Image: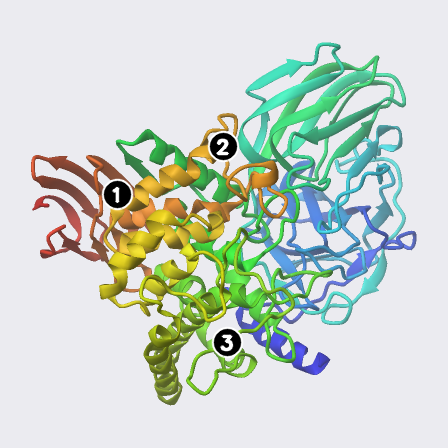
Amino acid sequence: MRKYLLLCACVGFLVSAEAKNKTDWKAHWINTEQCQSASNTWLAYRKTVSLAEVPRTLTAHIAADSKYWLWINGRMVVFEGGLKRGPSPYDTYYDSVEIAPYLTSGENTIAVLVWHFGKNGFSHVNSGLAALLFEAIAPGIEIVSDKSWNCRVYDAYQDTEAPYPNYRLSESNIRFDARRAMEGWNQPGYKNSFPGAEIASIVGKAPLGELVERPIPLFKDYGLKDYPGVRQSANGDTLFCRLPYNCQFTPYLKVEAADGATIHMQTDNYRGGGPENVRAEYITRNGVQEYESYGWMSGHEMWYILPEGVKVLEVKYRETGYDTEFAGSFQCNDPFLNELWKRSARTLYITMRDNYMDCPERERAQWWGDEVNELGEAFYALSPSSHKLALKGIYELMNWQRPDGSLFAPVPAGNWSKELPLQMLASVGWYGFYTQYYYSGDSTFVPVIYDRLHRYLHETWKVDKSGLPIERSGEWSWGDWGEQIDMGVLTNCWYYLALKAEKEFALQLGKKEDAEDISRMMYSIEQCFNTKFWTGTAYRSPGYRGEDDDRSQAMAVLSGLAPKEKYPALLKVLKKEYHASPYMEKYVLEALFRMNAPDVAMQRMRDRYAGMLGYKGYTTLFEGWGVGAEGFGGGTINHAWSGGPLTLLSQKVCGIEPTSPGFRTFRVKPQMGSLTEASATVPTLYGDIKVKLRKSGRNILMEIEVPEQTSAEVVSPKGKIQQIGSGTYNLKCPF
């Protein structure tokens, strides 16, 4: 079993990083003799380096289990480096950081703070070893982590008392006792001595395994900022600090106090989704002091709970997050749809960091059902740097494939291993892996994962004598939150779409026989699907006794298994049945656009999302249609799987879709319905596609910007097609 997993891990390791991974490491993993690698361990490292001259460039390769902060000559270089483990069940990521701009000729001080989570979670697998690796080599320069470094356990960082973060989180609450602070330890000229470091492990061996280059950018640091609004409780014991929007941030304070007062820090989202999430504590020393808690939180409001005698001089926050830009946009004459797109984009961004996550509070987990929706949204909302996060997730998902060929999510994970079969079909299929390839134009992952994908679809999954897939329960037979879920129909649709994606990959790789076999399988499903599931008014599985499932009808349309002559009946069902959670609602809405019913789709958007957008204080979308009992699964207020309308408003209403990989060619086929104005910007590797639509009389006036090196086809509502090259165009299309 281990041999098989190691083989998978190695394949992913060799190819997943964009740059060639280092194999010739001179550095070692180091810590200190005092370190027992307990959970929530913090280690401080120092190294003094003398340079005759500063090189033009010097790249430091840095790894840690689990996170690190880097200073050189007293300047912050990296705020929260490192990625949660792992690229496979056994390996670790490393960062590449350009450090030459921070160096000087003569003596240089390198200081690193490491936070060892020391426990498993839904987005991290614990190595069991708190350690740092640092290597920067250039002609005449060799800075490598070894016994010449100094290291000590930073015991000012401590555990809080209960309640602790729920078991899904690998992060601990952080308590900092300022009475044990090492003032200036990360600055040049620090006088107190550190113990010498010890070699803890070598590269390529357990428990930290092989090193894989970080495949996503270092996180963006927006710097310390003032809160937009601060109010105080009536008795003065709490500061409620409003953030500009729901974000990932770390809290800062400057106070005057006596020894031993405890300041509590948590957000309004501390119990988001039900169980406790992360919080922080600060124990004061005598005098004026300042502190920033480095474990990020999320929410709309930060709460500082103050004991008597503490004078607050200043509070700030530092937003950090995935390094991308809000490069896409959507506007129309309906303010509700504008707000829905805006909140969808904000929710998408707050669910991006080490990996795509379901939510930034309860789990921080890479559930792939969520990621399928999220990666689709990213192509319409964010700059191309966002593409790398889903690519990282693809390698992780396939590197964690089990010996029996099955796949599970979330990964990486140290305390979860259950398969959700329908989520996995969605992940590897048309809306997951194929969309990532087609919209980004990056096919480098395809030859790496193809054999494992093929094994999953053809060995783990089985078909019956008629060629229809046999339902699999996995460890969690889950199709969606909500009621009236017809798993049989959904299984067939998701499996068909997975085969459709696999066929395209097989053709791309020149695997003609595979493509022919897959075509035959798809044909069998096409021939049998309607016979088995069509009742005359809707699609239903034999034995299903619930109301007609809106999700199933939608997926029948989107898979192409439902012929067009059945659209009128299906439209009646989707006008009546409202069972999908926000996760599957995206597909219901898309099916309505596919059936050329944009007004029905947009009215359903308004109806479904009215309650959610009715919470005026929120800037993000929820896990369910509301909070509390309407929340589904615990009901977080940060779930980007709810952001499907973002994709559809840009993709369908403004009609912008690629017709070749990476938007090298694209289509503009708007479905405005009763809207009178709509516009969208879609960022691509070639530049921004811009479409502006306005109805005038019986015409749609279209202003279209086509980036250099691309071309487009414009499809009028009446079906007329016009080919255009790069440039700006003003067109008039009758409707």
- Determine whether 364 is above or below 625 in the image: below
- Determine whether 524 is above or below 717 in the image: below
Q: Residues within 10 Å of mark 3 (few under 14, many from 20)?
A: many
Q: Which mark is residue 296?
A: none
Q: Which mark is residue 453?
A: 3
Camera sees residue 686: no
In-image side of 251 versus 622 (left or right): right
Q: Which mark is residue 619?
A: 2
Mark 3 to mark 2 CA distance (whole Å): 38 Å
Mark 3 to mark 1 CA distance (whole Å): 38 Å
Q: Amino acid at mark 2?
A: Thr
Frontmost residue, 209 versus 571 = 571
Mark 3 or mark 2, earlier in chain: 3
Frontmost residue, 442 versus 528 = 528
Element type at marker 2? loop
Quarter of the image holding residue 360? Answer: top right
Mark 3 or mark 1, earlier in chain: 3
Coloration mode:
rainbow
In-image side of 18 versus 24 (left or right): left
Element type at marker 3? helix
In-image side of 253 versus 130 (left or right): left
Residue for badge 1: 599
- In front: mark 2 or mark 1? 1
Quarter of the image holding residue 20? Answer: bottom right
Q: Residues within 10 Å of mark 2 (few under 14, many from 20)?
A: many
Q: Residue at x 89, y 21 (%)?
A: 259
Mark 2 or mark 1, earlier in chain: 1
Q: Residue furthest right?
A: 34
- In front: mark 3 or mark 1? 1
In-image side of 465 versus 635 (left or right): left
